[in-house]
C-alpha cells in the first residue's frame, strides 16, 4: 500500500509539473497570465540629408595655344591637337621638307621599292608633289619622352619656306615656293 501511495504522489507531482510547464508556454514572456502585457518601443531615425558640393561651371575657354616653336637642330616639331600625328619642318643636308606621321586612310598601294613600313605618313619636299612615306621609324619627332607640343586649331607655323596649319580637318603643310603640299587626318588625306 505504501507503494501505491508513493506511485499516486509521483503521478500527482508529474501532473502538477506538466500543468506548470504548459501554463508557462502559453505566455511569451514566461510570466503567468495575470501579468501586464509587454510594451513595444519603436525608435525612428532622423531623416538623412545629402549635401552635394557646389562646383563652379566648367570653363568654356580653350587653353591658350602655343604660338612659339623654337627650332631644334634646324627643325620645328609639333603634333596634331588630338596627338594622332607627329609633324615637323626639317632641314636636311640635301633638302628641306615638311611632313606628318601617323595612321591615315586611305593609303595607296605599296610601291615595289618600299621594303619597310609604308603609308604611315605624308611629306612634301623642295621638288614635286607631296608623297606617302616609306619609313622604318619616327622621322618627325624631337625624340623626347612625350609627344611634341600640339599645334592648336587655327595656328600656323611658317619656317624654312614651308607653312603648316592646324584645322578642324587635319594638319596641312605646303611648300611656299612650289605650292605643293598635303592634308592629313585619321580618316582622310589629300596630296597636291
Image (spheres, helix red, strand yellow):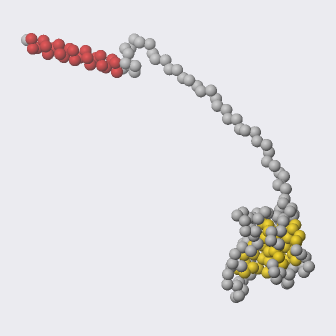
Quadrant of the rendered image containing residue 45? top right
* Viewer-nearest residue: 80 or 32: 80
Q: Looking at the image, which residue sits at the far right?
A: 177
Res. 63 visible in picture? yes
Say left or right for 150 vs 175.
left
Q: Using the image as rendered, state which of residue 143 and residue 172 is in the foreground.
A: 143
Residue 142 drawn at (x, y percent): 76, 68
**Residue drawn 80% across the image and 45% down it:** 57
Going 50% across and 20% down the picture, which residue do you hit?
40
Residue 139 in percent (x, y) is at: 74, 74
Q: Is residue 57 above or below residue 189?
A: above
Residue 153 lies, in percent from the top left, at 84, 63
Between 147 and 6, the one nearer to me in the picture: 147
Q: Is residue 184 visible?
A: no
- Measuring from the top left, give residue 126's x and y in whole percent: 86, 81
**Observer-nearest of 142 and 40:** 142
Q: Quadrant of residue 96?
A: bottom right
The residue located at (34%, 21%) in the rendering is 25
Q: Residue at left 64%, top 31%? A: 48
Quadrant in which the C terminus appears: bottom right
Q: Quadrant of residue 178?
A: bottom right
Q: Residue furthest left?
A: 1
Amino acid at each position: 500500500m505504501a507503494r501505491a501511495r508513493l506511485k499516486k504522489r509521483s503521478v500527482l507531482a508529474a501532473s502538477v509539473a506538466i500543468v506548470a510547464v504548459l501554463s508557462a508556454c502559453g505566455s511569451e514572456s514566461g510570466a503567468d497570465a495575470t501579468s501586464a502585457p509587454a510594451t513595444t518601443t519603436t525608435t525612428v531615425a532622423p531623416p538623412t540629408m545629402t549635401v552635394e558640393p557646389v562646383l563652379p561651371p566648367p570653363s568654356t575657354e580653350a587653353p591658350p595655344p602655343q604660338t612659339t616653336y623654337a627650332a631644334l637642330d634646324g627643325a620645328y616639331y609639333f603634333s596634331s591637337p588630338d596627338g594622332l600625328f607627329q609633324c615637323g619642318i626639317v632641314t636636311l643636308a640635301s633638302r628641306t621638307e615638311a611632313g606628318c606621321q601617323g595612321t591615315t586612310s586611305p593609303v595607296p598601294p605599296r610601291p615595289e621599292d618600299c621594303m619597310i613600313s609604308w603609308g604611315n605618313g605624308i611629306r612634301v619636299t623642295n621638288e614635286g608633289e607631296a608623297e606617302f612615306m616609306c619609313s622604318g621609324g619616327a622621322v618627325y619627332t624631337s625624340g623626347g619622352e612625350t609627344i611634341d607640343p600640339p599645334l592648336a586649331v587655327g595656328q600656323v607655323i611658317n619656317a624654312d619656306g614651308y607653312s603648316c596649319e592646324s584645322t578642324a580637318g587635319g594638319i596641312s603643310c605646303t611648300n611656299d615656293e612650289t605650292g605643293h603640299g598635303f592634308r592629313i587626318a585619321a580618316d582622310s588625306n589629300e596630296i597636291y
